[in-house]
Amino acid sequence: MILSSGVDIVDVYRIENIINNKRDKFYKKVFTLIEKKYIEENNHNPQTIAGMFAAKEAISKLLGTGIGKVNFHHIEILHDENKKPYINLYDEGLKVCSQLGIDNINLSISHEKKYAIAFAIGYGKDKRVQVPKEIKRLLPKRDKSSHKGTFGRVGIIAGSMGMTGAAYLSSMASLRTGSGLVYSIIPESLKEILSIKLTEAIIKPVEDDGTGHFTMNSFRQIIEIIEDMDIIAIGPGIGVDDQRLELIRKILLEYKKPVVLDADGINLVSLDPTILSYRQGPTIITPHPGELSRLLGVSINDIQKGREEYSKFTSNKYNTITVLKGANTVVTDGKEKIYINSTGNPGMATAGSGDVLTGMITSFVGQGMSPYEGAVLGVYCHGLAGDLVSRDKGEYGMIASDILNNIPYSIKNLEEFYNN
């Protein structure tokens, strides 16, 4: 498809005057060695030079930069054996062309005695991201006088022996999404490896009785740590047993601020769903169909056939914001609000992808967004980050850390709303 075009017209007499008075300086500024050789072979013909100059200007307009960041030497006008012009791009010119998704440029140059004109058309796949306005408006604009405390104190309760990646990915996702302070609350046995892996998060190890996972003896320390948090996430990689069920029950009932419940957090609550009914404070749950199946006692097949209906039912029954993951992730408060996501791809069906989403939603809510809007924006940006990975690496080799590393670029597409 045609993605862009550029046109420029040049006065041949003007170029002729420059050649007569400042030829060496003009050639040095505008043309590469190969271009200068071609000009010499054509006896410094003013019409030829004007045509090549117009072509460079036309290409700069096609790229949307003009001559500046992309300079004359980044655009090289060459000719085949039939003297048909074609283009080589370098440095910034090549970079911008790639960002626009242009993989082929057709160039036409024409001239007569007085004027030379160049017309360029760029073809390729459009790589620009069209973010819906209703999504862009969700992202809070940052005040210039802000400090790290402004952007939320987030607690991530995650991990167990063999599942350190869950704590790492969810904590790093919160940081990459913009949280000012992220506390990674982990079993004592994991502190050395996560202190190495998580250099920007604050590591808070708690008693685990040497088991490598949370126990009831973790409770009092956890409560003391999270009392000043704006939000917590709980569940990624924590494991399931009776002790951890009782632990999560006590945390959810005592902590009154927003909670994002994911993975084993949902699996534990599925053993006693009444915990959600008695909880005071907003709760966001982020199940995949298998986890929701366990929570509701409904088959995965039935849930997949009625994703919106079961999401609403869950939210109404347990007073939660429900994020049902999968193709076209559903976000609903069970009442009037429902969002069906349009970003994401099958490559995101990889271990740890859900942990990244948990960290993102937690971060947005911790920055002051409502639980519903924070969930919607987290889901959208998570899917977009995966789509950005897919463009460069494809879907087959995508891993969760690829999605993590593209979070800033996904959010950057929304930030541009404030500059337009």
Image (tube, rainbow, N blue to C red):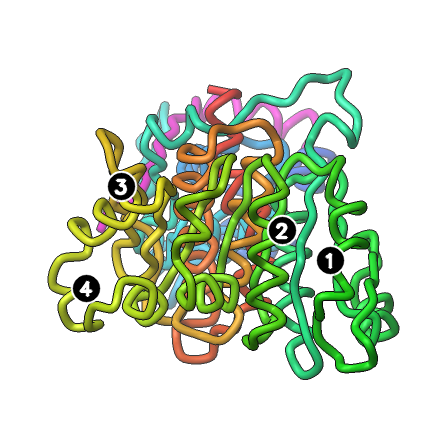
- Could you tell which of marks 1 and 4 lies nearer the N-terminus? 1
Q: Disc 4 designates what residue?
A: 303
* Residue 65 rendering spot, x and y as whole percentages: 52, 33
Whether residue 104 is in magenta: the answer is no
Q: Which residues are magenta?
A: 1-23
- Could you tell which of marks 3 and 2 lies nearer the N-terminus? 2
Q: For the residue labelled by badge 1, is the local secondary structure a helix, a strand or a loop? A: helix
Q: Quadrant of residue 20?
A: top right
Quote the CA–CA distance across marks 2 and 4: 29 Å
User: Crowding at label 2, few (<14), some or many (≥20) Cα neighbours within 10 Å?
Assistant: some
Whether residue 4 is in magenta: the answer is yes
Quote the CA–CA distance across marks 3 and 4: 16 Å
Q: Disc 2 designates what residue?
A: 251
Q: Is residue 297 left or right of residue 45?
A: left
* Residue 195 rendering spot, x and y as whole percentages: 86, 66
Q: Amino acid at mark 4?
A: Ile
Q: Quadrant of residue 412?
A: top right
Q: Disc 3 designates what residue?
A: 316
- Could you tell which of marks 2 and 4 lies nearer the N-terminus? 2
Q: Amino acid at mark 3?
A: Asn
Q: For the residue labelled by badge 4, is the local secondary structure a helix, a strand or a loop? A: helix
Q: Amino acid at mark 1?
A: Phe
Quote the CA–CA distance across marks 1 and 2: 7 Å
